[in-house]
Amino acid sequence: MEPERPIGYWLRHLDNLLEAQLEGTLAGHGLVRRQWQVLHSLAQRPRTGGELAQALAPFWRPGELAVEPLLDELTGRGWISRARGAELVSLTEQGRAVHRELTREVQRTRVLVLNGVTPDQYSDTVRTLATMARNVEHALAEGRGGPA
């Protein structure tokens, strides 16, 4: 049986495992997770570089790549385009095709990750984590960031 470990351990451990699993899923396309996140975000709707940075900021750790180098790389592949004279970035037809293919692969990874987890368990876990995050955000906003 697994030893009893605190939630922080499991959150960090799962995050590292998800990173490694997704890295393997994307490697066949020569992509990293952050490039996938840009493609996936743009598949929802065209955005400016600033909007992308804001939408993706919660997923990125301090010191990670900025959005612009990712946009340059994806533009070079012909997967995104930038409207001339505007900051708007959108997927090209080729980018949409790559996104559809990757979405199928990412979905297979999600199925693997959620094997044995019921929809109710998943929902309960997400709600619990969201509540815990709000509690900590509230405490930090009130200046209660450490022991009293």
Image: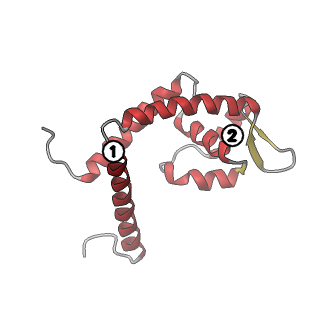
Image coordinates of residue 36 in percent, x first then y, are 58, 37
- Residue 20 visible in the current orientation: no
Q: What residue is shown with label 1?
A: 118
Q: Please report the residue visible at 75 percent of the width from the left and 45 percent of the height from the top.
A: 89
147, above or below 63, in the image: below
Spot the residue most to the top: 28
Image coordinates of residue 119 in percent, x first then y, are 37, 47
Q: In which quarter of the image is residue 135?
A: bottom left
Q: Please report the residue visible at 66 percent of the width from the left and 42 percent of the height from the top.
A: 43
Nearest to the eye among marks 2 and 1: give it.
1
Q: What element carries label 2?
A: helix
Image coordinates of residue 4 in percent, x first then y, are 15, 47
Looking at the rendered structure, the number of numbered marks drawn on it comes to 2
Q: What element carries label 1?
A: loop
**Disc 1 residue type?**
Thr
Image coordinates of residue 37 in percent, x first then y, are 57, 42
**Disc 2 residue type?**
Leu
Q: Please report the residue visible at 54 percent of the width from the left and 21 percent of the height from the top.
A: 28
Left or right: 27 as drawn, with respect to 90:
left
129, above or below 5, in the image: below
Disc 2/disc 1 C-alpha distance (Å): 37 Å
- Residue 32 visible in the current orientation: yes
Which part of the image, by quadrant, shows the C terminus? Answer: bottom left
How crowded pointer 1 is (Cα within 10 Å; few <14, some 14-19, many 20+) is rated as: few
How crowded pointer 2 is (Cα within 10 Å; few <14, some 14-19, many 20+) is rated as: many
Q: What residue is shown with label 2?
A: 71
Which part of the image, by quadrant, shows the N terminus? Answer: top left
Q: Please report the residue visible at 70 percent of the width from the left and 50 percent of the height from the top.
A: 49
Left or right: 114 as drawn, with respect to 82:
left
